[in-house]
Amino acid sequence: MSNDEDYVYDEESGEWLPAPELAEKQAAAERVEVRDAVGNLLEDGDQVTLIKDLEVKGAGQTLKQGTLIKSIRLTGDAQEIECKYPGIKGLVLRAEFVKKR
């Protein structure tokens, strides 16, 4: 029985796991799930629509309900998504105000 994999002790489970398996387990634990207003899981590149009018601070502009936002980016925060919208730089929206399209 040849075994060239390194095993690493997993403090959480108390088991010895192959190093790649433990690394994947830790990466999965660090991933943040971002969900929209109705509970759909959001991912980078998704399109979303606004579920209510939002006043954009600093831009002096209001985004209307139903506005389509294309190609979102997740920020690592469970409630914030980065968006691009014409005329507004660095737009960050709260996930509770959008619905996946």
Image (tube, rainbow, N blue to C red):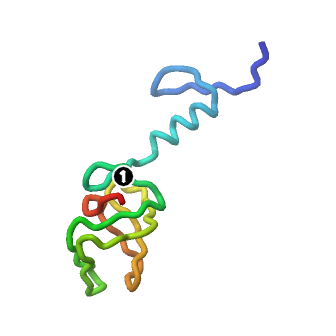
Instruction: Indicate whether 74 appears above or below 9.
Output: below
Query: Which part of the image, by quadrant, shows the C terminus?
Result: bottom left
Q: Secondary structure at mark 1?
A: strand
Residue 25 position within the rendered picture, expressed as x and y whole percent measured from the top left: 52, 35
Residue 82 position within the rendered picture, expressed as x and y whole percent measured from the top left: 40, 67
Instruction: Indicate whether 93 appears above or below 26.
Output: below
Q: Residue at x 35, y 71 (%)?
A: 68
Q: Residue at x 38, y 70 (%)?
A: 69
Single out the residue that lies furthest toward the left.
52
* Residue 12 position by quadrant: top left
Instruction: Indicate whether 26 appears above or below 46.
Output: above
In this rendering, position of residue 57 left or right of residue 82: left
Query: Which part of the image, by quadrant, shows the N terminus?
Result: top right
Instruction: Indicate whether 51 appears above or below 77.
Output: below
The crowding category of the residue bearing disc 1, from other C-alpha atoms within 10 Å (few below 14, some 14 to 19, many at least 20), is: many
Q: How many marks?
A: 1
* Residue 98 position by quadrant: bottom left
Type of amino acid at the residue the image marks with label 1: Val
Taking depth in this image into account, of 32 and 11 the one nearest to the observer is: 32
Taking depth in this image into account, of 29 and 45 the one nearest to the observer is: 45
Taking depth in this image into account, of 5 and 101 the one nearest to the observer is: 101
Q: Residue at x 41, y 63 (%)?
A: 47
Q: Residue at x 24, y 76 (%)?
A: 64
* Residue 5 position by quadrant: top right
In this rendering, position of residue 27 left or right of residue 3: left
In this rendering, position of residue 36 left or right of residue 1: left
Single out the residue that lies furthest toward the top.
1
Which residue is label 1 attached to? 34
Residue 90 position within the rendered picture, expressed as x and y whole percent measured from the top left: 41, 76
Residue 3 position within the rendered picture, expressed as x and y whole percent measured from the top left: 75, 20
